[in-house]
Image (tube, rainbow, N blue to C red):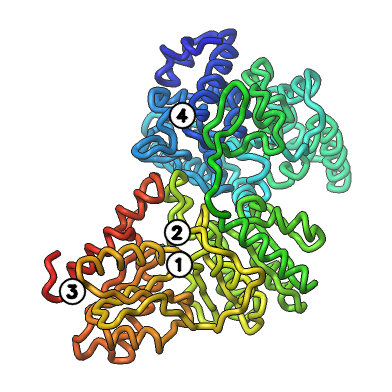
Amino acid sequence: METSILDGLDEPSSLRLLPESALQGVADAVRLEMIDAVSVTGGHLGSGLGVVELTVALHHVFDTPDDRIVWDVGHQAYPHKILTGRRDRIRTLRQPGGLSGFTKRSESVYDPFGAAHSSTSISAALGMAVGRDLDEASVKAKGGPAPKRRNMVAVIGDGSMSAGMAYEAMNNAGALHSRLIVILNDNDMSIAPPVGAMSAYFARLASGGTYRGLRETAKQLGKLLPKALYQRAAAAEEYARSLVVGGGTMFEEMGFHYVGPIDGHNLDHLLPILKNVRDSDQGPILLHVVTQKGKGYAPAEASADRYHGVVKFDVISGVQAKAKPNAPAYTRVFGESLIKAADADDKVVAITAAMPGGTGIDLFGKAHPDRTFDVGIAEQHAVTFAGGLATEGYKPFVAIYSTFLQRAYDQVVHDVALQNLPVRFCLDRAGLVGADGATHAGAFDLAYLCCLPNMTVMAASDEAELVHMVATQHAHDSGPIALRYPRGEGVGVDLPETGVPLAIGKGRIVKRPEGARVALLSLGTRLSEALKAADQLESAGIAVSVADARFAKPLDEALILDLAATHEVLITLEEGSVGGFGAMVLHLLAEKGALDAGRVRVRTLTLPDLYQDHNSPETMYAEAGLDADGIVKTVNAALPGQKA
């Protein structure tokens, strides 16, 4: 199958000129183009393959970009990018300087809202719809001509519908009666009955103007009946409608007109129904589309996760080109350490929010299925749920990516820290994450956790330290405690057989040569770069002490004050934003008067105060000045008498 049919389709306006009979050929070509591109770049494959026909149909039926299409999460937006002027750059996905793996407003006018965290699409599209309605009302009030009709469409997957935010938005949309279209892409939950010609016929009937007009007329006439009779008639109508439209009663109760389910791979079904919902004056509408993740690519269809996220792979065989690891990944070390804790203590439970594989909880789940809780994309619930478990004497470990814990910050503050409940937070993907870019970077947890009373915050400098810190969390029952660790492989140190709890708030000296003028105080895995920098500086005749802080809160005050008192330069290192560990150290030094005499020069190396675009982690840390060369440069600039 050739992809040449795409050559003239640089914009959706060209797609809209094609006859409907040509659209399946376009979809087939988009699918091939996407498979080939992702085989080169890696990325999210299965979800995009599942919405190819839907994407083609949406851009054919709707007048994008004037009509807005908001893709939830953005995992499934690669076909959308191919059809919206980015086909020539599709093989730069997630590459340095290339296309984002998610929708991004600065990348295209066809991306009306940036997405990478899930369940935001309905809220965003509703905001756009209300903005449109306010504009229309303003023009009407001024006596101007009616503005061009515009549609707002949110495409959300069934997984994203597990988050409370989606229902908050739907509840608001139903109350506002704004003209909004929500497309529920059901590719996993199997909440739909079998789809086929009869289902499509009913969906087309339910979405059409005649049915909706008759239904509204019947409602108005029904209100003239006695109240008891009207209520019985309404109940009978709802029951009869549920027979026609299937499982949409819940959405109807929230104020949506439910249409579906329909086959999301059948353009003969999709196109007329999309036209009906496009032309409807009723709102809001929910269109239930059933798709198959990984559709059209046999290796993905056969895979358990439908090739949700992949590295580079061979198109013919589907075999992914994963490099052999040099050291165990931090995520695996965490999962195995937690299993050992649970083996010894039946009060240990593990909680994750739809990311068991990404956090190592999948390993724990195989060993202790009865004590494993995947709550779906519901971080707020996960944290408060853990708080409830803690009140009953259990030891909950909440494993969530650093970037996703941001979604539950109020619960961390109010439901856990304020009540001083011993919830264990395990923050995977702390620091920079490479190809996923700014939306997934774990940049802010140090800043947003260290400011909380009762909270203890640790960061592992290597995989052996991670083992000990899991043991520390297990032993810590006096309040909440957080542990952060990065994505990827460890540094290759020997792992202890069992973890030993660390003394809370105590760091360690890694090296302290006689006559050291410079102290490098590292938190987390920048320790290896600090040691490299120390070697470079010592080869230039500058002796350097290196310390591993271990704790960002509480700080090892004695260690820090000693380093400040005995060195000319003190530099803190962290894989986090401004306002985190370095700020805590500066606050301590100022509070204790350690800076008053001006004998020590302090510099805090953090991530830059901006959102870094996706690149390799090594390049991103170098840009931030957090590699060995950057550390040496900072030392030379700060050390008295040194040339920068």
Amino acid type at image mark 3: Leu
Residue in the image at 66% along x and 29% along y: 300
Q: CA distance from mark 2 to mark 1?
A: 9 Å
Amino acid type at image mark 4: Lys
Pointers 1 and 4 in contact (CB under 8 A)? no
> Tag on residue 431?
2
> Within 10 Å of the Cα at label 4, are there few (<14), some (14-19), or many (20+) other Cα atoms?
many
Q: Between tags 2 and 1, which lies in front?
A: 1
Circle 3 is placed at which residue position?
639
Amino acid type at image mark 2: Gly
Residue in the image at 54% along x and 83% along y: 504
Pick whichever of labels 2 and 1 is earlier in the sequence: 2
Residue 121 x/y as whole percent: 55, 43
Q: Quadrant of the C terminus?
A: bottom left
Circle 1 is placed at which residue position?
524
The foreground one among 68 and 614 is: 614
> Tag on residue 81?
4
- Specify whether 265 is left or right of 403: right
Q: CA distance from mark 4 to mark 3?
A: 50 Å
| Residue 73 drawn above or below residue 205 | below
Pick whichever of labels 3 and 1 is earlier in the sequence: 1
